[in-house]
Amino acid sequence: MQNDKLQDNRIKTCIDKYDTLYFTHKYKYNDLKFDSSWELAYYIWLKDNNIEFTYQPRPAILYFWNGDNKYHKYYPDFIVNNEIIEIKNPYLYSKFLLEGTKDNAKYKKMLEYNVKILTDCSTYLNYIELQYGKNYLDKFKL
């Protein structure tokens, strides 16, 4: 019974705080979790170049999706020089463009906030390879 209550609380917290039941964190570096090697490479590049930034800034940006008639939370990847940055590979970016989807509702809110979407992180990935070695990011996979 106690385990069921804990599980119910975990589910409620995940939905309330993160708008999802599933976590996709794939990397851990400096006690922070990252969804992709691209995010991690960009983070390291910013740190190494002494650029001030905030990773996963709070509070969330709320957006509404007609599909479930609910508000959802969007947490950007970074704020750099007062600019909101989101990192998406081209496939995930293409999902933003599908009208009527939850991703599209999120994308429209991102446009309202002038979010800069990076769909090519080769500069940051190349930097990591040159500075730390080809397989450096693999060390931080979860």
Image: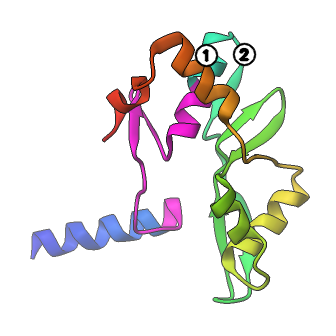
Q: Is residue 9 above or below residue 23?
A: below
> Residue 1 appears in which quarter of the rendering?
bottom left
Which of the two residues, 85 or 137, is positioned nearer the viewer here? 137
The residue shown at (64%, 43%) is: 77
The residue shown at (34%, 38%) is: 141
* Number of numbered discs on residues: 2
Q: Could you tell me the amino acid type at mark 1?
A: Lys
The residue shown at (90%, 59%) is: 112
The x, y position of residue 74, in whole percent, is 66, 59
| Residue topped by disc 1 | 47
Q: Is residue 90 above or below residue 78?
A: below
Would residue 60 be found to the left or right of residue 36 on screen? right
Q: Is residue 133 above or below residue 35?
A: above
Are circles 2 and 1 on residues that touch, CB within 8 Å?
A: yes
The residue shown at (72%, 16%) is: 51
Please, which residue is most extreme toward the left here? 1
Which of the two residues, 10 or 87, is positioned nearer the viewer here? 87
Q: Could you tell me the amino acid type at mark 2?
A: Ile
How crowded is the residue under tag 1: few (<14 C-alpha within 10 Å), some, or many (20+)? few
Would residue 138 be found to the left or right of residue 116 on screen? left
The x, y position of residue 12, in whole percent, is 39, 70
Q: Which residues are magenta?
A: 16-43
